[in-house]
Amino acid sequence: MLDVLIIGAGLSGIGAARHLQKQCPDKHWRIWEARSAIGGTWDIFRYPGVRSDSDMHTLGYAFKPWRGTQAMADGPSILSYIREAASETGVAQHIDFEHRVVSADWSSENACWRVTAQGANGSTRVQETRFLYMCGGYYSYAQGHQPHFEGQENFKGALVYPQFWPEGLLYADKRVVVIGSGATAVTIVPAMAKDAAHVSMLQRSPSYVVTRPAQETVGVWLDRFLPFDLGYRFVRWRNIVQGILYFQLARRKPLFFKNYLISMVKKALGRGFDVKTHFTPSYAPWDQRVCAVPDGDLFKQIRQGKVSVVTGQIDRFDTDRIYLQDGSSLKADIVVVATGLQLNVLADVAVRVDGQAFVPGEALAYKGMMLSGLPNMFVAFGYTNASWTLKADLTASYVCRLFKYMDKRGYRCVNPQHDPAQTTQAFLDFTSGYVQRASAMLPKQGAASPWRVHQNYVMDLLALRLGGFEDGVLRFER
C-alpha cells in the first residue's frame, strides 16, 4: 500500500514529488508515467521553435531557480531542466515508466484507491494507495483538435499536426501554410520561416500577439551586485505582480488594454500593414489567451517578407493548394494544422467511487485542486493567465500541509462536499475553442471561495499557505 501515487512525470509530477520528498519524508510514494521518459508535454512536443510563452522565473520550480538567461526558454532547455530536477533530487528513482493508468476505484470500506495501469507490452499492474495525485495536465496526449477540411485527402504534400511532428521533415525552400493563429501557430511560423521559401499563417480570425523579451536582462544585471537567490526572487516577484496587474487591467479596462496591445503591433509592423484585419480580434483581451512572441520574431519575419498572414475561411483543399471562400488560394508543399489542442479530464482515467462512475462535469472544483465528491484525490491544475508551475507549486505545498494536519488528528479520508444549491459557472472563464469544446466534461466552479477559481497567485498564496482546513466544506473521516 502506497501513501501517495502520483500520475505523470512531467513538470507538475516532478514538482509534486519533490514537495512530498522534502516536506513529508515519512510518506511512501511513487510516480507512474505512461510514457518511457520524463518531461510530459516538453518531451512530447517536438515541432520547430517549441518554447514556453511564460517566463522561466515563474515557470521554473520554487525549489530550483532557473539559472539560464533565457526569459522565454526553448522546449529542449525546459526538458533538460525538468530532468535535471528529477535527477539531482533523487525523484527519478521513484518513477515507474510505461504505466498508463486506465482506471481508479475508490473503496470507502478500505479507505484507499485501487489503481490499474497497462504496460507497453499489454501487461496489467494494480496498486493500492491512500491518496491519488493527478499530475497529467489537461491536454490529451492521444490527439489534438483535428478538424476535417473538404478535399484534404486530395492534397499531395505533407499534412502535419504539431503534436505529432514527423521526425526528419524537410521544409527548406518549401512553401508552407500553417493553419491557426494561437500560441502554437505563432511559434511554428517564425521558426519554419528561417529555412522555408515562404510561410503563410492562415487564420480564421486574429489573436492578440504581444512582444516579450527573449532574454532576462534585469536578472543578469542584478547578478552583478546581489546574491543570485536575492536577484532571482526579485525578478520572479516582479514578473508575478506585473502579470497580475496586466490581467486586472485587461479585465477592468478591456477597451483601453485592447488599444494598447494593438498599438504595439502597429508599431512593430508599420503603417503599411493591415493590422485591423489580421491582428485585431473581435473579443476582449484574455477572453482567450494572449500569445507572446520573443523579441517580436513573428513581426520581424513579416516585415522581411518571409511570412504573410491571411485571414479567411477555408473552402477546400486541392492537390497543391488551399482554396478560400473568397475565391483566393494558397499554394503549399506542406500544411501544418495548428488548430488547437484537445482537453481531457483526470488524464482520461475511468474513475469510480464505491462502484459508481464519477462524472467530473457534475463536480465543483475545491480551491482549483480537488473535486467535490472525490475522496483523497488531488489535481495539479495551473493558471491560464500565468505560469502553470505557480499554481502547481502552491497545490503541492498545500497537499503536504494537509497530510500533516490529517496525520496529527488521525484522519484517513478527506472529501470536499458542496451544497447542491451552490451557484455554478464554467471552470475556465475562456472563450477559446478548445475550452468551449470541452465545457461539458470540465468541472464547474462556484461563485465564492473555496469553490471559486481565482486565477490569481497572490490570492491563492494567502489561501493555500495560510488558510485553515476546517472550513465546513472539507469532510474528514477517521
Image (cartoon, helix red, strand yellow):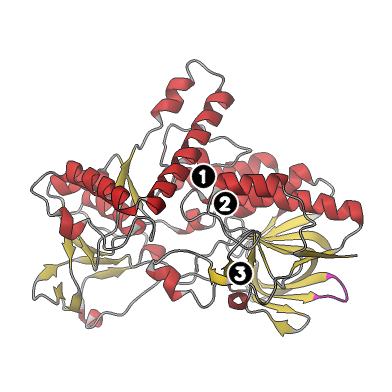
Q: CA distance from mark 1 to mark 3?
A: 22 Å
Mark 3 Cα-neighbour bin, 10 Å: few <14, some 14–19, many ≥20 = some
Does residue 33 show up? yes
Q: Position of residue 120 (x, y in %)?
A: 61, 70
Q: Which residue is mark 2?
A: 11
Camera-side residue: 137 or 239? 239
Label total for image:
3
Location of the C terminus (image quadrant): bottom right
Residue 125, image x, y percentages: 73, 72
The image's mark for residue 316 is none
Please report the bounds of the magenta region as a residue range. 107-111
Q: Which residue is mark 3?
A: 346
Residue 59's disc is 1
Real-space CA distance between mark 3 and mark 2, rounded to the nearest whole angstrom: 16 Å
| Image quadrant in which the N terminus is located | bottom right
- Residue at image location 58% in from the left, 26% down from the top: 229
Can residue 17 be seen here? The reply is no
Amino acid under disc 3? Leu
Q: Amino acid at mark 2?
A: Leu
Nearer-the-camera pick, 228 or 163? 228
User: Which element type, helix, strand or loop, lies under badge 3?
Assistant: helix
